[in-house]
Image (tube, grey):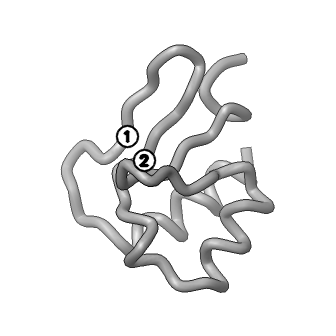
């Protein structure tokens, strides 16, 4: 749980969208353009299982399903 909260806290710095998340086929997606995220934050997000997608979001297979 702490990893998920940390990842969402990092991603929250880059969006103020009302509903920035969605889940589909066991993948949690957060609509934050990876190009806007600092290299340090991207590295930490990778450690927390959130991976940048070229379509403009971060995805996590770890937190998409139980």
Callout 1: SS: strand
Q: Position of residue 5 (x, y in %)?
A: 62, 54
Q: Which mark is residue 21?
A: 1
- Quadrant of the rendered image containing residue 48: bottom right
Where is residue 61 shown, x and y percent of the image?
67, 32
* Spot occupied by residue 16 in the image (x, y as percentages of width and height): 24, 65
Outermost right residue: 47
Q: Which residue is mark 2?
A: 30
Marks 1 and 2: CB-CB under 8 Å? Answer: yes
Residue occupying the point 73% across, 49% down? 49
In this view, 10 is above or below 52: below
Category of crowding for the residue at label 2, using alpha-carbon neighbours closer than 10 angstroms: few (below 14), some (14–19), many (at least 20) = many
- Residue at left offset 55%, top offset 56%: 52
Q: Is residue 4 left or right of residue 18?
A: right
In the image, taking residue 51 as reference, residue 62 lies left or right, namely right
Secondary structure at badge 2 equals strand
Mark 1 or mark 2: whose residue is earlier in sequence: 1
Residue ID at (30%, 66%): 15
In what quadrant of the picture does the C terminus appear?
A: top right
Left or right: 35 as drawn, with respect to 58: left
Nearest to the observer: residue 20 or residue 34? 34
Looking at the image, residue 43 lies above or below residue 16 = below
């Amino acid at each position: 749980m702490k990893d998920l909260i940390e990842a969402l806290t990092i991603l929250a710095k880059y969006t103020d969208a009302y509903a920035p998340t969605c889940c589909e086929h066991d993948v949690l997606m957060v609509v934050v353009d990876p190009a806007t995220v600092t290299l340090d934050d991207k590295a930490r997000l990778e450690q927390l299982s959130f991976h940048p997608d070229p379509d403009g979001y971060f995805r996590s297979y770890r937190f998409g399903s139980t």
